[in-house]
Amino acid sequence: MLSCEYSYEVWYAVLRRCQPPPSMITSWSELLSWIWSSPSKKLTLLRKIAVQTVIFHLWKQRNNLIHNQASLSTATVFHGIDREVRNIISARRLRKPFKDLMQMWLR
């Protein structure tokens, strides 16, 4: 999930949207530290949503490759992640913690 070139490209595209760490994340403990080290609760929430979505989509792609011998481009996977994060935020936009998340995600 963190070490292959394919997942690296997906993670890189997503982390750029969430104030990326100074160096690429290479372990689960670094990933968790990065999530919790954000300067605001809103950014922590956005990072949690983004990380959960990336893990889900990478796992889905892994299963697709194993069971169907079909691979999607990293751009296609990122597009799916982007769409899902937008949908999660939009569905909860009236809740106070989600109020400014869309602006944070789209910058």
Image (spheres, rainbow, N blue to C red):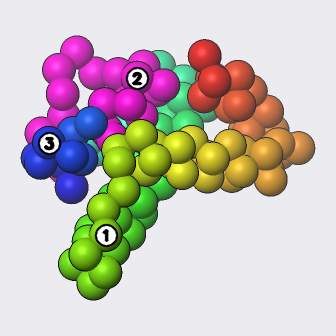
Figure check: 60 above or below 14: below
Q: Could you tell whether 3 is left or right of 77 in the image?
A: left
Q: Amino acid at mark 3?
A: Glu
The answer to which of marks 3 and 2 sits earlier in the sequence is: 3
Which of disc 3 and disc 1 is earlier in sequence? Answer: 3
User: What amino acid is labelled 2 in the image?
Assistant: Arg
Mark closest to the chain's N terminus, 2 or 1 = 2
Which of the two marks, 3 or 2, is nearer to us in this view?
A: 3
Residue 99's spot in the image, x, y percent?
79, 33
Q: Residue at x 25, y 75 (%)?
A: 69
Residue 5's disc number: 3
**Mark closer to the observer (2, 1):** 1
Q: Which residue is mark 1?
A: 70
Image point (12%, 48%), residue name: 4
Q: Residues within 10 Å of mark 2 (few under 14, many from 20)?
A: few
Q: Secondary structure at mark 1?
A: loop
* Observer-nearest of 71 and 47: 71
- Residue position for label 2: 16
Q: Given the image, on which type of amino acid does mark 1 rest?
A: Ala
Q: Name, please, the residue furthest toward the right.
A: 94
Query: In terms of secondary structure, where does tag 3 sit?
Result: helix
How far apart are the alpha carbons under marks 3 and 2? 17 Å
x then y, percent, for residue 30: 19, 38
Nearer to me, 10 or 92: 10
Cα separation, mark 2 vs mark 1, equals 27 Å
Where 54 sits versus 65, above or below?
above
Q: What is the span of residues highlighted in magenta in the rendered image?
A: 10-28
Residue 58 spot, x, y in % from top left: 33, 59
